[in-house]
Image (spheres, helix red, strand yellow):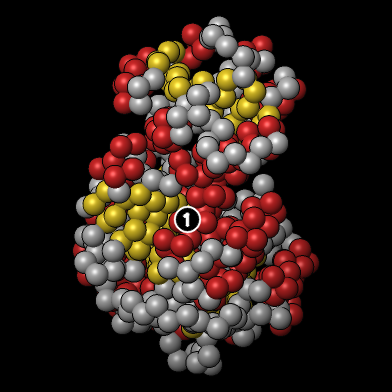
């Protein structure tokens, strides 16, 4: 099943800043031991921009139904959704079922705006309140699957079963074992005839929570604090509003993202979403935790899924999935950027890594020499590249283009040898690099993930070996100052941050994605704020 069949508008109309382009509500789960703590959280939910709150009664330690519900429902400055989730549906309540349902009936009587009741007990519950409600309350009938995301057919049947209970709003929450599982949730939302909440939980389901606004979900959930969530994979309200510009996502919003594994560390969404907003471009940029590039691209083949950055470990896989490849990317054997050509939907692959990295290294060398020479300061230099993956290929190729003598060092010698032969260079293992010292003033570029968060105490080369290099570049940018760069600086080398490569390629990719000039100062400012 793919998303190509979902009917989506594809207008590129630029939108005025601040205009709201969807009706999807942001619901903030309220989970605390006491009603006083809950009320504090409810007030905070209003401050941060939530539209309604989900009062999770199952979290209260000493629940006095009438007194506590009256207090919370009447005092809440936001509309209230009351949930009393039992352990058998992933909640905290493990007491008498009759008392639990009485609590939900009482919430209706006391003026709650929404009640969430589980599918398993919904027919009986809805029958028990028929003719006894004011008519203002909306009943959400929910189904939670903590194991997987069922097939499209099974989800369709589940929606029908929920609708048959007399639900005002259908809620389906599944677990995403792969990012492609979210597509089945989008299908449900796009084809639903009644108000529907559709969510795929867990890290691989994040895009379902953000693109819920594109596909018309009734609401999405946003937590008050990172990590304090009512279900796995929940973003914060702050991230929904400030990082992903949630209110500006519409049915015709163009989807971009960074494809990698892991991907949680990526700063790209901060850069591109801020930049898109600043120029009024109707697009969103997401972190895409992808296991199989091919499956991802086959599933999300709609014309609205338009552009991707590629990072570790998917740069070579990305190349294999392109319809057309830029000659430079072909020579490197990896892509860092993919665009869906609007005219025919063909996937075009580019490599802009080497542009960003080589430019940053050249700037570092020129600044140290105090020269502004026309030729490349890399010409004739011994240029050692650690790593033979996508970024390693880009740097080795870039070094060769600039006239450097390239050496490739890799954990496995075979991969180093294969890359070195392509650029007319020398190959060695990382162990051999420790004692490699044919001359002073060498240039070093690390393109592996050694030293990246959370493993910030690791380094690909000892401090003793670093004394032979005049400049050291690290492609990692989280943290900005890696152990490798810190020890290189202490050894007297010029250091060049991975952020410089990242920013130079961001300018190029932004222009490829949007067709507009990159807001360079803004992109630099955002990167400084987030590293």
Whether residue 326 sits left or right of residue 456 in the image: it is left
Whether residue 71 sits left or right of residue 378 in the image: it is right
Q: Report how many numbered discs are placed on residues in the image.
A: 1
Q: Quadrant of the N terminus?
A: bottom left
Q: Residue at x 69, y 51 (%)?
A: 528
Q: Residue at x 72, y 26 (%)?
A: 489
Vertical comparison of 425 with 451: above or below? above
* Disc 1 crowd, CA 10 A, few/some/many (<14, 14-19, 20+): some
Q: Which residue is mark 1?
A: 508
Q: Nearer the viewer, residue 505 or 77?
A: 505
Vertical comparison of 367 with 468: above or below? below
Q: Nearer the viewer, residue 310 or 331?
A: 331
For residue 46, say whether it is visible: yes
Q: Residue at x 43, y 87 (%)?
A: 130
Q: Secondary structure at mark 1?
A: helix
- Quarter residue 372 falls in: top right
For residue 216, say whether it is visible: no
Q: Position of residue 412 (x, y in %)?
A: 39, 16
Q: Residue at x 44, y 67 (%)?
A: 514
Vertical comparison of 228 with 103: above or below? above
Q: Nearer the viewer, residue 86 or 319?
A: 319
Q: Position of residue 442 (x, y in %)?
A: 58, 20
Q: Position of residue 473 (x, y in %)?
A: 59, 31
Q: Nearer the viewer, residue 78 or 74?
A: 78
Q: Position of residue 421 (x, y in %)?
A: 32, 21
């Amino acid at each position: 099943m793919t998303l190509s069949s979902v009917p989506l508008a594809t207008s590129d109309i630029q939108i005025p800043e601040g205009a709201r382009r969807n009706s999807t509500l942001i619901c903030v789960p309220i989970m605390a031991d006491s009603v006083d703590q809950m009320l504090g959280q409810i007030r905070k939910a209003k401050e941060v921009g939530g539209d309604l709150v989900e009062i999770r009664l199952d979290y209260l330690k000493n629940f006095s139904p009438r007194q506590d519900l009256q207090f919370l429902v009447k005092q809440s400055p936001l509309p209230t959704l009351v949930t009393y989730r039992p352990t058998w549906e992933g909640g905290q309540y493990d007491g008498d079922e009759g008392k639990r349902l009485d609590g939900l009936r009482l919430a209706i009587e006391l003026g709650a705006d929404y009640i969430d009741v589980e599918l398993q007990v919904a027919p009986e519950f809805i029958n028990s309140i028929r003719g006894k409600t004011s008519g203002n309350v909306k009943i959400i009938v929910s189904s939670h699957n903590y194991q997987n995301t069922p097939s499209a057919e099974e989800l369709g049947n589940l929606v029908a079963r929920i609708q048959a209970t007399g639900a005002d709003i259908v809620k389906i929450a599944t677990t995403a074992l792969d990012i492609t599982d979210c597509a089945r949730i989008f299908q449900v939302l796009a084809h639903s005839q009644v108000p529907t909440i559709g969510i795929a939980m867990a890290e691989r389901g994040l895009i379902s929570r953000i693109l819920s606004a594109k596909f018309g979900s009734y609401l999405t959930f946003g937590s008050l604090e990172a990590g304090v969530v009512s279900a796995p994979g929940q973003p914060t309200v702050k991230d929904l509003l400030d990082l992903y510009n949630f209110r500006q996502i519409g049915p015709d919003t163009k989807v971009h993202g960074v494809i990698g594994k892991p991907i949680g560390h990526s700063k790209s969404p901060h850069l591109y979403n801020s930049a898109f907003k600043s120029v009024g471009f109707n697009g969103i940029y997401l972190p895409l935790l992808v296991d199989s590039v091919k499956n991802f691209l086959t599933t999300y083949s709609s014309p609205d899924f338009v552009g991707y950055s590629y990072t570790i470990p998917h740069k070579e896989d990305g190349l294999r999935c392109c319809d057309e490849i830029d000659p430079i990317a072909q020579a490197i054997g990896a892509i860092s950027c993919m665009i869906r050509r609007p005219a025919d939907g063909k996937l075009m692959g580019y490599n802009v890594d080497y542009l960003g990295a080589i430019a940053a290294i050249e700037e570092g060398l020129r600044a140290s020499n105090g020269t502004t020479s026309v030729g490349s300061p890399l010409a004739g230099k011994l240029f050692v590249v650690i790593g033979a993956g996508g970024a390693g290929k880009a740097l080795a190729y870039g070094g060769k283009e600039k006239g450097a003598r390239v050496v490739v060092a890799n954990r496995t010698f075979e991969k180093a040898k294969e890359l070195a032969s392509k650029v007319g260079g020398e190959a060695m293992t990382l162990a051999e690099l420790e004692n490699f010292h044919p001359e002073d003033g060498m240039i070093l570029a690390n393109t592996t993930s050694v030293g990246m968060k959370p493993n910030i105490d690791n380094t690909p080369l000892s401090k003793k070996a670093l004394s032979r290099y005049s400049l050291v570049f690290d492609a990692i940018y989280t943290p900005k100052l890696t152990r490798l760069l810190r020890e290189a600086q202490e050894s007297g080398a010029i250091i060049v941050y991975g952020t410089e490569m990242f920013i130079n390629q961001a300018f190029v990719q932004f222009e490829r994605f949007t067709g507009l000039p990159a807001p360079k100062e803004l992109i630099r400012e955002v990167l400084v704020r987030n590293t």
